[in-house]
Image: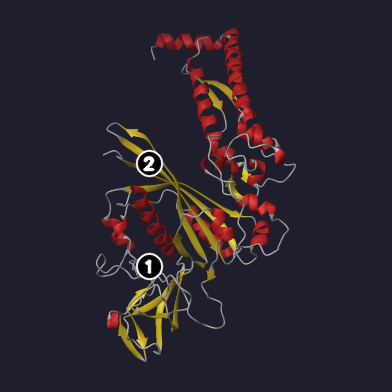
Amino acid sequence: MDPSYKNLFIQLEKDIVFVKKRKELLKNKFEEIKKQMIEEFNNHPVTVEIEGGIDSPNISGTLNGRTNLFSFIGFDAGSNPIQPIRELLNQSLFRISSGNSGVVKATFDIPTAKMIFSITPMPWAAGRSWARGIERGISGLGFYLKKNKGSRSGLGIQSRKQIRKGAKFKNTQYISALINKYEKKFKELNNITL
Amino acid sequence: MKPTFSHDVVNSFFLWFDNFLLNKVEAYKTYTTKFYNYSDDRLGNNKIVYGSPYKQWVYDQNITGATIPSGLTIDNTFVPTGTSGMEFDFDNGRVIFNSGVSTGLDITGTYSVKEINSYITDQTEEKLIIQNKYISNSRFTLTENYIPPYVPSTPSVFISMEQMNNEPFSFGGEDLTTCYLKAVAFCENLYQLDGVLSTFADSFNETFNKIPMTGHPIGEFGAVKTGVYPTGYNYKTVNASNSSQKFYIDDVETSKIRDNDIKELNPDINIGFIEFEIKTSRYPRL
């Protein structure tokens, strides 16, 4: 960097009014995008359907209307599997750091898809994420396990009973697409004019 | 229909998976047992069958310490394969003779058996776990007899290709192909299941080469294809000689059905899942 520019930037960093204004502007923009991200997550058909609980219609269209995601995945009645994701998205933050070089760095900490997958375990399988399952496919196993919980009436590994027909899962975009989209939007904050 | 890329992926992955498990944790046991005569209408030509009590014998010469039989002891005399058409059906754990061979022979043999059998499947998880019927690879049975052929036996792993997608990778039409493969493991106990899951959780960043379908070692009757592998099948050698396309394991996730949930299904079995994300770069349109 040209020394005159470097000097200018260093002087700017000493200007409290400028630094404060910059932070405020960035914060507003950041919070605006963060709000959009959480709203988009909240309004996603999968989120709405799961939050609708055991009686929700299959508004996400992932199960041909045969059952709903809450039951199909096998969540416990009364549980709120969406809340941990919302909390994690809410924890998104930004910070500004500057050094002697005159270069100021804004870092945006938003959860990765992998982080979200790690806090969304299947209710019946430790280590498996239902949120990732929405994107890659979920078997009807949770539905079956839930349905037969507490019953030992001959249903087992060698059961001849058919599991519910028609409740075949259709993958849909969910967390990865959301995070990718907003990662780009946060990165665009690098280009804002002060 | 000619074999496609996805056929080759599944074949290559299956052979790598088997070799990795057998080598890494020595997941095999060696037995010397009697063989029992039974009839099998599927074979035709009045073939004579003698079955062992265990199925899915080890046939990979790369597995150090495993015994790959070259013949059997018949009426106290060692008889090599090829005699009276004798060939081993490694998958079904048996020996097949040409018609005319006596059904009252006293046959014994030594062979190594996979501790975890492996199968390729296209069935859904729920179908595999809930509806299918399996037999146990009778390691703990008191009365020894032959194990029925064809029906999958546990402990076992079922491998399936879930999804595949391409995304642009470089100029000139090169794509990055990602394949999602899943293995459902049925184990006798938690120790065994944890062993399988842990072994493959550590396979992150492992690589293996594309071995075409024609390179699959097992033929029609479950014997090693002598036309393709005249001196026997060795995964390490075969993998090294098929180096035109390399796959790498970009991600592995393991999980298991919670104990209290699976006990509702079957108290004698432990079920886990291994999900692989496998990548390679290729020119799919050339």
Work out whether residue A48 or residue B66 is closer to the camera in this orientation and state it.
Answer: A48
Q: Residues within 10 Å of mark 1 (few under 14, many from 20)?
A: many
Above-or-below relation of A126 to A184: below
Indicate the amino acid at tag 2. Thr
**Farthest residue toward the right?**
A78
Q: Amino acid at mark 1?
A: Ile
Residue at 39% x, 62% y is B19
- A40, above or below B259, in the image: above
Q: Position of residue A150 (x, y in %)?
A: 73, 58
Q: Is residue B191 left or right of residue A84?
A: left
The answer to which of B275 and A144 lies nearer the viewer is A144
How far, Cα to Cα, is label 2 from label 1? Answer: 30 Å
Report which residue position mark 2 lands on. B177
Residue B200 drawn at (x, y percent): 48, 55
Depth order, front residue of A135/A194: A135
**Mark 2 burial class by Cα count in 10 Å: few <14, some 14-19, many 20+:** some
Q: Disc 2 or disc 1, which is closer to the eye?
A: 2
Query: Do residues under tags 2 and 1 come within 8 Å of each other at their CB atoms?
Result: no
Residue A110 position, x and y percent, is 57, 29
Q: Nearer the viewer, residue B105 or B230?
A: B105
- Which subunit holds the residue at mark 2? B
The chain carrying label 1 is: B
Return the x and y of residue A11 as percentages of the image width and height: 51, 9
- Look at the image and name its color scheme: secondary structure
> Visible in this render: residue B266?
yes
* Picture disc at residue B63: 1
